[in-house]
Image: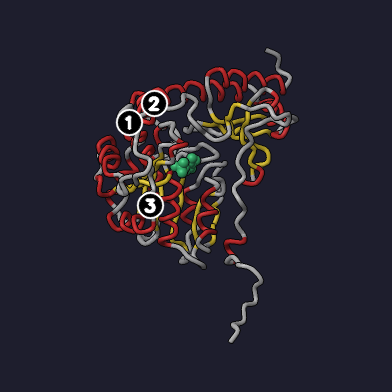
Amino acid sequence: MTIARPNPRPTAKPWIAEIHAYVPGKSKSASGKPLVKLSANENPLGSSPAALAALAEAHVAADYPDPDAKALREAIADVHGLDPALIVCGTGSGELLHCAVQALCGPGDEVVCSRYSFSLYPLLAHKVGATPVFAEPEGYGASVDNLLAAVTERTNVVLLDNPNNPVGTFLLPSEIVRLHAGLPSDVLLVVDEAYGEYVDPAFQTQAFELAAAHENVLVSRTFSKAYGLASERVGWVTGSAHLIDLVNRLRGAFNVSVSGQKAALAALGDQNFVERSRNHNATERARLADAIAMLGNHGVSASPSEANFLLVHFEGAVTAAQALAALSDAGYAVRHLPSQGLPDALRITIGTTEATTDVIATLRALCGEAE
Ligand SMILES: *Cc1c(COP(=O)(O)O)cnc(C)c1O
């Protein structure tokens, strides 16, 4: 007997067919010259020397890593005053965000996020057949009222990056508490703190407290940004025992490599590097923001940022495309985000002191403001 098979080749689920492959930022100019990347929010100071030393140590490549990343979870718990049993490590925080959405959403369900937020969020929804729903922002940053208004009976997850990427805006802890208080108790609130280490230390702990006190809050952190270990792919989440159990069921069994666990562990022990990264970022971000504020009469402005980048808006004679080209000519790759609905803006990562100086000079020259 032949079984009727209408498709001539393996055929994707319709929601998978809708997904576009990730388009990374450029790291070469039109002429093929390598560019300094100010396009992926990487740490311009590199990595902690302690992490680099740990990576240089030999290990047995033939052996699987610790599947539970026990030593790393204990060190994370130590630094942040958390329970190691309520932490899961992942292949970057991205893996764990995926697990959370996968555990709670399928076709017909809705995932709410702010209109301008991490480009991964709609992808996470599409991967499981759910529908991303975009709440209108306030200015460009997330609006708690609009996020709450976007929640329907189909909503299972609200994803909030705080600070936000690509805008850089930050909601104060009181606003996060207000958002959580307005959600039904069966809707998961994910507070994605990928840039959490760049924020004023006074505002770095409240999301953890919310996650410890409620069953529907997950907080994610990463070693990819302030810890300068993007290549090692290590992130983590903390939340209630129920949420941690769900994420543990779905994550990869050996999801953090031996070198990733070692590097992250050593990096945690060098909080001095994190503090240096935060201070460097605050200084250079303020310098770039001040210079951009002086170009206001040319229609150039930046959204307020607590992260390691500025979203720069070009609403006058100089366009974002022109600024992108001029910065490329000067040797710098930045992020143009027309596909995220921001055709008139560039996201510029805060780089070295030299990079900030060059970016300022390039933007001033483009606006006809001689030095
Ligand atoms: C960079 C970033 C992450 C981190 O992703 P990893 O998978 O940990 O490298 C998470 N969320 C946001 C908003 C980011 O910008």
The quarter of the picture where the C terminus appears is: top right
Give the Cα separation between the discs numbered 2 and 1.
8 Å
Give how far across and how far down residue 331 sits, in percent.
65, 24
Q: Is residue 24 left or right of residue 266?
A: right
Q: Residue at x 45, y 22 (%)?
A: 280
Report the residue marked by disc 2.
48
Give how far across and how far down residue 311 sits, in percent.
58, 34
Nearest the eye: 112 or 108: 108
Is 226 placed above or below 127 here? Answer: above
- Identify the amino acid type marked 1: Ala
Is 214 placed above or below 1 here? Answer: above
Whether label 2 touches label 1, CB < 8 Å: yes
Q: For label 3, count other residues whose C-alpha is less than 10 Å away and answer few (under 14), some (14-19) or many (20+).
A: many
- The image quarter containing residue 3 is bottom right
Give how far across and how far down residue 196 sits, in percent.
40, 36
Report the residue marked by disc 3.
180
Q: Residue at x 46, y 62 (%)?
A: 155
Report the residue marked by disc 1.
266
Disc 2 versus disc 3: nearer the observer: 2
